[in-house]
Image (spheres, rainbow, N blue to C red):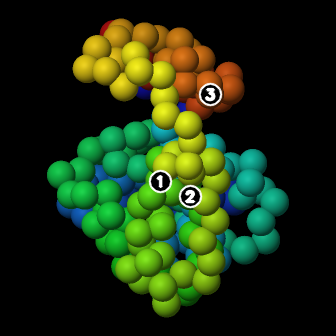
Amino acid sequence: MATRFGAASPWLSPYGFRTVAGSRTWVTGERHRPAHVILHGLPMNADLWTPLAAHLADPILAPDLPGLGRSAATTQPVDAWLADLLSPVRTSPALVAHSMTCGTALRFAVDHPGRISRLVLLSASFLQAPAPRLTRSGLAVPMMRRMSPAQLAQTLGVPEGAEVQSAAAACAAAE
């Protein structure tokens, strides 16, 4: 496993696994009274938000999405997963979403307008130009599965950083 598995930044305490929509989900931050709920995109995890959290005075809630980071996959739709994640929240936080989670966050905001104070969408995947045909083909998934984390990150345009290095370390340990 990655050398930093299970470690979390002090400003993201508490942290640990929680059952969300029937799946084991890694959750960092304040579960009941967050001012911000922040959702990462592909192929990241909640650690992506660590530098941002250092600049926020108010508590945040940042999970690893189902099947990403430390979280297990879920059999539930991601919309149901997000609703269950936010069920113990007693505040009206800002909901911040990146990339592929923007659609889920937007649907949550439409379905539950009183549950959030604002919606922030960063690089919404549904507003981006379509990917090249090769990456949308039936061959793309098997091809990407054979790539190293660094190659996949480069192909997807993800900058080199701790998240990519962590994914590479986890893959190496699994082999």
Name the quadrant containing residue 103.
bottom left
Which residue is painted at 54% across and 17% down in the image? Answer: 155
- Mark 3 or mark 1: name the one nearer the start of the chain: 1
Which of the two discs, 3 and 2, labels the residue nearer the N terminus?
2
Identify the residue shown where x is 28% and y is 66%. 80
Distance between the Cα atoms at labels 1 and 2? 6 Å
According to the picture, the residue beneath numbered tag 1 turns out to be: 101
Badge 2 is on which residue? 97
Mark 3 Cα-neighbour bin, 10 Å: few <14, some 14–19, many ≥20 = some
Question: Would you place residue 18 above or below residue 68 in this image?
Answer: below
Residue 132 at what x, y percent from top left? Answer: 48, 22
Can you name the residue that lies furthest to the left here?
75
Residue 172 lies in quadrant: top left
Mark 3 secondary-structure assignment: loop
Q: Amino acid at mark 1?
A: Thr
Q: Are marks 3 and 2 in contact (CB under 8 Å)?
A: no
> Which residue matches tag 3?
158
- CA–CA distance in space, label 3 to label 2: 17 Å
SS assignment at label 1: helix
- Tell me the kind of residue under disc 2: Ala
Labels 1 and 2 touching (C-beta < 8 A) = yes
Q: How dense is the environment of label 1, judged by Cα within 10 Å: few (below 14), some, or many (20 and up)?
A: many
Query: How many labels, in total?
Result: 3
User: Where does residue 14 sit, x and y in percent of width and height?
Assistant: 55, 63
